[in-house]
Amino acid sequence: MPSPAPDFLAILRVLTAHGVDFVIVGGVCGVLHGAPIATFDLDVVHSRAPGNIDRLLGALSELGAHARGQADRQVAPDRSHLESPGHQLLMTSAGPLDLLGALTHDRGYDDLVRHSTEVTVSGMRLRLLDLETLIETKEAIARDKDRAVLAILRRTLEEKQK
Amino acid sequence: MERPQATLTGPTADPLPAEATHSSDGVDLTLIRWMLSLTPAQRLDVLQANVRSILILRDAIPRP
C-alpha cells in the first residue's frame, strides 16, 4: 500500500476553520517564504491562551490527532499538553503535525507573532514567522538538521532583498 | 555570401545573462529564484508534490 502523503493544506484548513491562533514555523514556513527545501511535517507554535486551547482541542479532535511514536496506542493530546511550552509530535488524518508551545524556552506565540507576516493561501490568512526570525531561531538552536537548511534560508533572504 | 547559421554556441548567439547560478556555499540560486517567482500557494503545491513524489519513489524500493 502506498505511503500516505501529508496534506499540509488540509491541516491548515481545519486549524483555520476552528479559529486557532498559531504561527507557522519550520520547513513549511521556509517553503512559503520561497526556500526550495523539503519537509514531511507541519510545525506551528500555538497560542496557549485558554480560549485558544479550547479551539485547538476541537481542531485536533476533527483531525483525529494522536501522539506519534506510541506504537499501537493512540494517545490524544489533552489540555495540559497544549498548555505546556513543550513540543507535541502528533499524527493526524492529514499527516504529521508538530504543535510547539514555544519555539525555544522563551519564544512562545505572543513573542513570535510580533515577528510574523501574513500570507493568503487558498483563501486562508496564515501567519508565518518572518524569514529573518526563522533564520535567527535556527541559528540559536543549531542542531545539525537546522544547520543543513540554514544556507538555503540565508540565500533565499538575500535573493528576496535584491 | 551565405550567412552562418546561428547556434547556441556560435558567435552570433546572444550571450546568456551572467547571473550566478550558485552561491559561494553551493546553494542553487536558480531554484530559489524559481520559488520566489511563485505565489505562496504555488510554493505549497510544489512542496506537496515533492513529498508525494519522494514517497512514491521510496515505496518503489523493495524492502528487505
Image: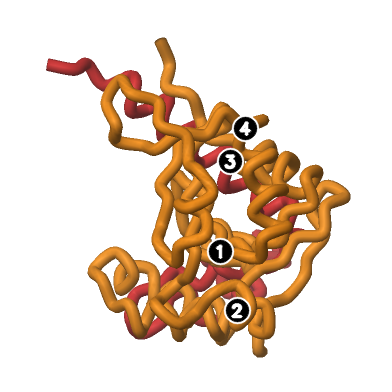
Which amino acid does the dot numbered 1 rest on?
Val
Please tell me whether mark 4 or mark 1 is closer to you in this view: 4
Q: Position of residue A70 (x, y in %)?
A: 29, 31
Name the chain under label 2: A
Quarter-wise, where is residue A108 in the image? bottom right
Q: In the drawing, what numbered circle is on residue B48?
A: 3
Which of A99 and B56 lies nearest the eye of the viewer?
Answer: A99
Give chain B's shade.
red
- Element on which disc 4 rests: helix
Q: Position of residue A103 (x, y in %)?
A: 46, 71
Name the chain under label 3: B
Quarter of the image with the N terminus of chain A in it: top left
* Residue linked to disc 2: A112
Q: In the drawing, what numbered circle is on residue A68?
A: none
| Residue plotted at (60% across, 83% down) | A111
Which of A45 and A160 lies nearest the eye of the viewer?
Answer: A45
Q: In the drawing, what numbered circle is on residue A61?
A: 4
Please tell me whether mark 4 or mark 3 is closer to you in this view: 4
Please tell me whether mark 3 or mark 1 is closer to you in this view: 1
Circles 2 and 1: CB atoms closer than 8 Å: yes
Q: CA distance from mark 2 to mark 1?
A: 8 Å
- Element on which disc 3 rests: helix
Q: CA distance from mark 4 to mark 1?
A: 18 Å
- Element on which disc 1 rests: strand
Circles 2 and 4: CB atoms closer than 8 Å: no
| Residue plotted at (51% across, 72% down) | B29
Give chain A's shade.
orange
Please tell me whether mark 3 or mark 2 is closer to you in this view: 2
Which amino acid does the dot numbered 2 rest on?
Leu
Which amino acid does the dot numbered 4 rest on?
Ser
Q: CA distance from mark 2 to mark 4?
A: 26 Å
Label 3 neighbour load within 10 Å: few <14, some 14-19, many 20+:
many
